[in-house]
Image (tube, helix red, strand yellow):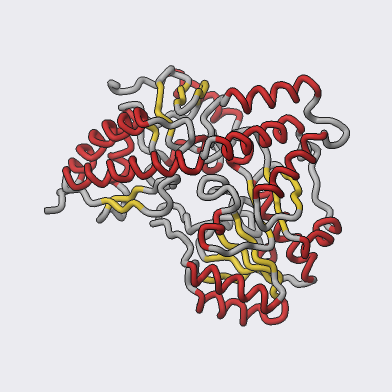
Amino acid sequence: MSSLTNSRDSSLRERARKVVPGGMWGHMNAVALPEGYPQFFARGAGSRLWDVDGHEYVDFMCSWGPIILGHHHPEVDAAARRQWEQGDCLNGPNEAMVELAETLVGIVPHADWAQFQKNGTDATTTAVTIARAGTQRRKILVAKGAYHGAVPWCSPSLVGVTTEDRAHILTYTYNDAASLEQAVALAGDDLAGIIVSAFQHDYGHDQHLPDVAFAQAARAICDRTGAALIVDDVRAGFRLNLGGSWENVGVRPDLSAWSKAIANGFTLAAVTGNDRFRDATSSIFTTGSFWCSAMSMAAAVATLTVLRRDDGVGHMTRLGQALRDGLAGLSRQYSMPIRQTGPVQMPMVLFEDDADHRKGFAFCAAAVQQGVYFHPLHNMFLSTAHTPEDIARALDAAEHGFKAARAVAPAHD
């Protein structure tokens, strides 16, 4: 692909700046991406994405995670369409809610029940509220640098956030059991819960899977103190293990928060939990006029059905490993060391000796010109729609990326 022209995108950015503060907000703001990345998109199909100027990309962000079966998966869309024709936003829930709750309880080993929301932030906040209601305590332990949503108790930004919003939040270091014990001691007899990411996926940093010893320590602490162990599976859920990401380390939480991939792009979130927190969940008041969207729930049932039937986790693992192996080979070929961390289904690629991220930005800018949408600082995502041909195209684009990265800094010997 030659240098991209983005006249339509540029026009939309200018129009947006006049009517949207800053032109765009939050993590989807393309201002934070390398030059040449589009802000506005027109459509998606399978593993591909098209921007408003008609440029096609192999999509390795999957809408920041929600797309797990590929854009416009026919079975999911058909299920959503059938429900849409009957009704979506009604005076109460549809039968699809019960079917989805039954499906989740059948898939997730720790789950005795499920409750539904709309966003990942809704789910994590609801889980924290349930933990406090069930324990009648206040303190929540959160890993330093972890992202659990975008409301005051957990936002990565302190703008507009008061000290009081975080008065009962204490921090520990992920994968550090001693640090966790220290935070537990500070909480004393007021410990309501420990919230942990499925794996450590801090923005712009190497990713770390949970150590078994750390996961076991978190479980033991909650068993000892009566606190709730909460796994935030919003980002990783259904890509690492359909039963919950911490099934891979043999530890089951009391509560889990889900969203992103649960309905293949239709808006939905969920909290699942064990019977210990059933009454607490019934006692809290948490709601929203759109939280019982029947169309999204029908889409979720279809999504989970396809993932189970087609071994979606296995497919994403195989292709993710192929991408990782190919990038490692190119790294050696061009003498440009990289670090690939975290699960292969959710690739994270950072360059060595790249504190200012110039190499990573050059790499991604070159790749996007070749029609492959990578991200320089955030973990990426595989879907079941990705094919070996997509991986081959990605590696061809990555070769251009390594050449561009080598041009901005001396290569290693």
Towards the viewer: 211 or 408: 211
The answer to which quarter of the image holds residue 91 is top right
- Determine the residue located farthest toward the right in the rendered image: 91
The residue at the far front in this view is 309
Front residue of 176 and 278:
278
Q: Position of residue 224 (x, y in %)?
A: 67, 79
Q: Position of residue 402 (x, y in %)?
A: 23, 40
Residue at 58% x, 40% y is 308
The answer to whether residue 248 is visible is yes
**Which image quadrant is residue 229 in?**
bottom right
Question: Residue most toward the left?
Answer: 413
Count of residue discs: 0
Q: Where does the image place residue 266, in percent across and percent down from the top left?
A: 64, 33
The reply, left or right, for residue 387 in relation to residue 255 is left
Q: Does residue 231 lie above or below 296 as drawn? A: below
Q: In the displayed structure, does residue 86 sit left or right of residue 33?
A: right
Indicate the quadrant where residue 166 lies. bottom right
The quadrant in which the N terminus is found is top left
Asked whether residue 366 appears in the rendered view, the answer is: no
Q: Is residue 142 left or right of residue 209?
A: right
Asked if 286 appears above or below 88 in the picture, the reply is below
Q: Nearer the viewer, residue 112 or 65?
A: 112
Query: Image height check: is 8 above or below 232?
Result: above
Residue 306: give x, y in percent of width and height.
59, 34
Identify the residue at image location x=78%, y=28%: 88
**Residue ID at (81%, 38%):** 289
Q: Residue at x 60, y 32 (%)?
A: 20
